[in-house]
C-alpha cells in the first residue's frame, strides 16, 4: 500500500462524492451494478504484488479526471510528478501537456491541455490488444495494462484516440497511466493531480464536479470524438476561444467552431502546396508490416487463382495443376505466407513472445488476422505435401485417401476459408475511428486489389512458361491472368478515387493525411497513380489479346511486373507513413513530430535528456 505521510496536505485527499447514479453515457457509476453482480466488492488488487484492500469507501465507483482548461498555466508539473512516480525514462510520459492557440494581437489566446489515459467505459485498447494485457477493473474503473504481458505490437497505440498507451522502442513494450490506484486505495488523489499548481487538474468519482466548478463537459477544442471510447474525463472551459484555433506541433490540423459551438478538425496547410518526392521518408518503423501485408496478399492471390481455377474447371489451370510446376507454385505461396508471418513477428517489440498473439480471439482483429493467416499457411503447406509426386508419406499412412483427389482437395478447401478470414481481419485491423485515413472501405479495395493483381501476375509468370515449354496453348491462361490483374488494378483505382474525393471534404485528420499525400509526397503519389494507369492499360491489352505472342509479350510482361511491384510498395508505404491519428495536440519535444525530425537531422536525438529516441527495438 502507498504510505501516507503524516503531513499530507488536505488537497491531496479525495473528497466524499455527491455524484448521480449514472454517468453522461447513461451507464451506472457503481461498477458492481454495471457488471451485473459478476464483480465482487472487496477484491484485492495486489498492487505492487502486495495483498490487502485499501480504505477507500468508493473503490467500486467509476472515477475520472476533471480538467479546468481556464486554470492550466502549462507548467508541466503534472507531467513531472507522473514521470517521477512511475520512474519513466525521458522518452516516455504517461501524461503530457500541449496547447491550441488562436486569434491575433492583441486578442491572442492559448488553451493548455493536460492529457493522460481516460480509463474509458469502452476501452478500445483492451479490445484491440492481442495479448490481453489490458483489464478494465471494477475498482475505480481503472483500465490497467501489464507491460510484462505485452509483446510490443503497438496496436493499442493505434486505436487509442488520446495517445495514452506509450510504446517504448527500447524495451519493446507498452505502458500507460495506471490511475495511481495505489494512492487511490488510501484515499489520495493521483500524483499528477496533487502536483497541479493552478488547480486545473482534479480527480474523483465521475460526474461529481470539484469545488467551485460549474461544468462537466465531455469535450473541448482539440479533443477527439468522445463517442469513440466514452472517456472518463470531464472538462470546464468558461473562457471563450477564437472561432479557429491551431496546433503548435507539426500536425497539419486546426480546429474550427461550427454553428453548434463544437470544434471540428480541418486541414491546416502548414506544409504549403508544393509537391515533393520524399522517397526516403517512405521508410518507417512499419516496414515489416508493409512486407507482411504485401507478401501475405500475394500468397492468397496466387493460391486462390491456381487452386480455385483448377477446381472451377478452367482448362489452363487444370493443365498447370497436372504439370511439375504446380508444386513449386504452391511452395511459393507457402513461402510468401511464411515470410509474412515472420515479418509480422519481427515488427513486435518482443518477437520471441509471438505466441501470445492469439490470447484475445474474442475481441482483437489482430488475433483473428494472425490465426487466419497461420491456418492458411498450414493448410496450404499440407496441400503442397499431398500433391508431391509419389507421396510415400501420406499414401503409406492413409492409403487411397492420400491421393490428390481426396486429401489434397480437403487441405486446399480448408486453406480457402482460412485465407479469407485472414484477409478480412487484415482489413478490419485498420478500420480504426482514431485514424480516419484508414477508416474507409478503400482499405479493403487496396488489400483485395493487391491479392488479385499479385495472384494473376505470379500465376502468369509461373504458368505461361510452363505451358509454353510443354507445347501447350497459353492464350487462355494469359487471358485469365490478365483478367485478375486488370480486376485488381481497377478495384484499387476505384477505391483510391473515392477515398481521395471523400478525404478532400472529410474535415477530419484523414483530410490532413490526404493533404500531406498530395504535397509532401505529391510526386511519389502521382507516380504510383500513373503506374497504376500503366498496369490497367497493359493488362487490358493482354485481356483483349493484343500482346499474346512474340517478343513484345515478354517485354510488356516485364514492364507489368516491375510496375506492379512499384505500385504495391509505394502505395503500401504511403498507407503507413501518411496516417494522422486523432491525438491531442502536443508542442514539446517528442510530442512534436517536426521537432523529432529536426533532432534526428542534427544529432540532438542522441542526447537522452532530450527525450527523443529512434524507433528501433
Image (cartoon, grey):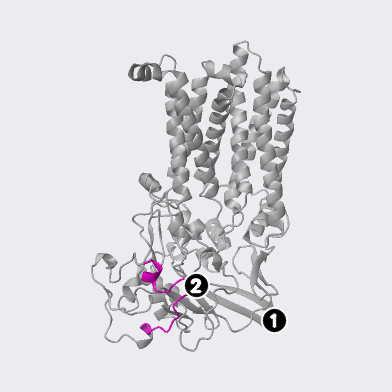
Which residue lies at the image location 35% right of the left edge and 73% below the top edge?
60
State the image quarter where residue 445 is shown.
top right
Count neighbours of disc 1 (C-alpha within 10 A) and say few if under 14, some if 14 to 19, many if 20 or more.
few
Q: Residue furthest front?
A: 36
Q: CA distance from mark 2 to mark 1?
A: 43 Å
Q: At 53% from the left edge and 78% from the top edge, which residue is drawn?
A: 235
Residue for badge 1: 105
Q: Position of residue 373 (x, y in %)?
A: 47, 39
Q: Is residue 19 above or below residue 134?
A: below
Is residue 562 or residue 30 the one in the foreground? 30
Q: Secondary structure at mark 1?
A: loop
Badge 2 crowding class, 10 Å Cα cut-off, few under 14, some 14 to 19, many 20 or more, is: few
Q: Is residue 387 magenta?
A: no
Frontmost residue, 603 versus 434: 434
Q: Which residue is mark 2?
A: 26
| Residues in magenta, as a range | 12-36
Q: Does residue 164 appear to the left or right of 224 in the view shown? A: left
- Where in the figure is residue 193, as x and y percent of width and height? 42, 78
Amino acid at each position: 500500500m502507498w504510505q501516507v505521510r503524516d503531513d499530507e496536505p488536505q488537497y491531496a485527499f479525495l473528497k466524499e462524492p455527491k455524484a448521480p447514479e449514472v454517468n453522461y453515457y447513461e451507464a451506472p457509476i457503481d461498477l458492481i451494478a454495471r457488471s451485473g453482480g459478476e464483480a465482487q466488492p472487496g477484491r484485492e488488487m495486489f498492487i505492487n504484488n502486495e495483498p490487502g484492500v485499501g480504505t477507500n469507501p468508493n473503490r467500486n465507483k467509476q472515477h475520472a479526471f476533471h480538467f479546468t482548461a481556464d486554470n492550466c498555466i502549462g507548467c508541466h508539473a503534472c507531467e513531472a510528478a507522473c514521470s517521477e512516480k512511475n520512474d519513466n525514462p525521458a522518452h516516455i510520459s504517461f501524461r503530457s501537456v500541449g496547447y491550441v492557440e488562436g486569434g491575433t494581437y492583441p486578442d491572442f489566446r492559448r488553451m493548455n491541455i493536460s492529457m493522460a489515459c481516460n480509463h474509458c467505459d469502452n476501452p478500445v485498447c483492451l479490445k484491440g490488444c492481442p495479448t490481453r494485457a489490458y483489464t478494465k477493473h471494477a475498482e475505480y474503473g481503472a483500465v490497467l495494462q501489464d507491460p510484462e504481458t505485452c509483446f510490443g505490437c503497438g496496436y493499442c497505440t493505434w486505436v487509442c484516440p488520446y495517445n495514452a498507451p506509450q510504446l517504448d522502442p527500447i524495451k519493446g513494450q507498452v505502458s500507460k497511466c495506471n490511475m495511481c490506484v495505489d494512492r487511490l486505495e488510501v484515499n489520495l488523489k493521483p500524483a499528477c493531480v496533487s502536483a497541479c499548481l493552478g488547480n486545473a487538474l482534479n480527480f474523483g468519482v465521475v460526474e461529481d464536479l470539484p469545488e467551485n466548478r460549474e461544468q462537466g463537459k465531455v469535450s473541448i477544442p482539440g479533443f477527439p470524438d468522445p463517442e469513440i471510447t466514452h472517456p472518463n474525463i470531464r472538462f470546464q472551459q468558461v473562457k471563450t476561444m477564437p472561432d479557429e484555433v491551431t496546433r503548435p506541433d507539426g500536425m497539419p490540423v486546426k480546429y474550427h467552431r461550427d454553428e453548434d459551438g463544437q470544434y471540428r478538425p480541418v486541414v491546416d496547410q502548414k506544409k504549403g502546396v508544393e509537391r515533393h518526392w520524399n522517397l526516403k521518408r517512405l521508410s518507417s518503423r512499419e516496414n515489416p508490416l508493409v512486407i507482411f501485408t504485401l507478401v501475405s496478399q500475394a500468397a492468397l492471390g496466387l493460391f486462390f487463382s491456381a487452386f480455385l481455377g483448377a477446381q472451377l474447371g478452367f482448362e489452363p489451370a487444370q493443365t498447370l495443376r497436372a504439370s511439375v510446376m504446380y508444386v513449386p507454385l504452391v511452395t511459393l505461396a507457402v513461402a510468401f505466407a511464411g515470410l509474412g508471418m515472420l515479418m509480422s513477428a519481427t515488427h513486435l517489440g518482443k518477437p520471441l513472445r509471438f505466441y501470445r498473439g492469439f490470447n484475445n480471439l474474442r475481441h482483437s482483429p489482430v488475433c483473428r488476422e494472425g490465426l487466419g493467416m497461420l491456418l492458411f499457411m498450414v493448410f496450404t503447406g499440407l496441400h503442397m505435401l499431398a500433391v508431391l509426386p509419389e507421396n510415400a508419406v501420406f499414401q503409406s499412412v492413409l492409403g487411397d485417401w492420400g491421393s490428390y483427389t481426396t486429401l489434397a482437395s480437403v487441405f486446399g478447401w480448408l486453406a480457402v476459408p482460412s485465407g479469407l478470414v485472414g484477409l478480412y481481419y487484415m482489413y478490419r485491423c485498420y478500420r480504426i475511428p482514431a485514424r480516419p485515413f484508414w477508416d474507409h472501405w478503400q482499405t479493403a479495395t487496396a488489400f483485395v486489389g493487391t491479392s488479385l493483381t499479385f495472384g494473376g501476375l505470379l500465376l502468369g509468370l509461373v504458368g505461361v512458361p510452363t505451358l509454353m515449354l510443354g507445347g501447350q496453348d497459353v492464350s487462355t491462361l494469359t487471358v485469365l491472368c490478365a483478367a485478375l490483374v486488370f480486376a485488381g488494378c481497377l478495384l484499387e483505382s476505384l477505391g483510391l478515387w473515392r477515398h481521395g474525393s471523400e478525404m478532400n471534404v472529410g474535415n477530419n485528420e484523414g483530410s490532413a493525411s490526404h493533404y500531406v499525400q498530395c504535397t509532401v509526397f505529391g510526386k511519389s503519389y502521382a507516380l504510383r497513380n500513373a503506374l497504376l494507369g500503366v498496369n490497367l492499360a497493359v493488362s487490358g491489352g493482354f485481356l483483349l489479346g493484343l500482346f499474346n505472342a512474340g517478343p513484345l509479350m515478354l517485354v510488356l510482361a516485364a514492364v507489368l511486373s516491375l510496375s506492379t511491384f512499384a505500385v504495391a510498395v509505394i502505395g503500401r508505404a504511403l498507407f503507413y507513413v501518411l496516417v494522422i491519428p486523432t491525438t491531442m495536440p502536443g508542442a514539446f519535444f517528442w510530442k512534436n513530430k517536426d521537432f523529432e525530425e529536426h533532432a534526428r537531422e542534427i544529432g540532438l536525438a542522441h542526447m537522452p535528456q532530450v527525450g527523443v529516441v529512434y524507433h528501433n527495438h
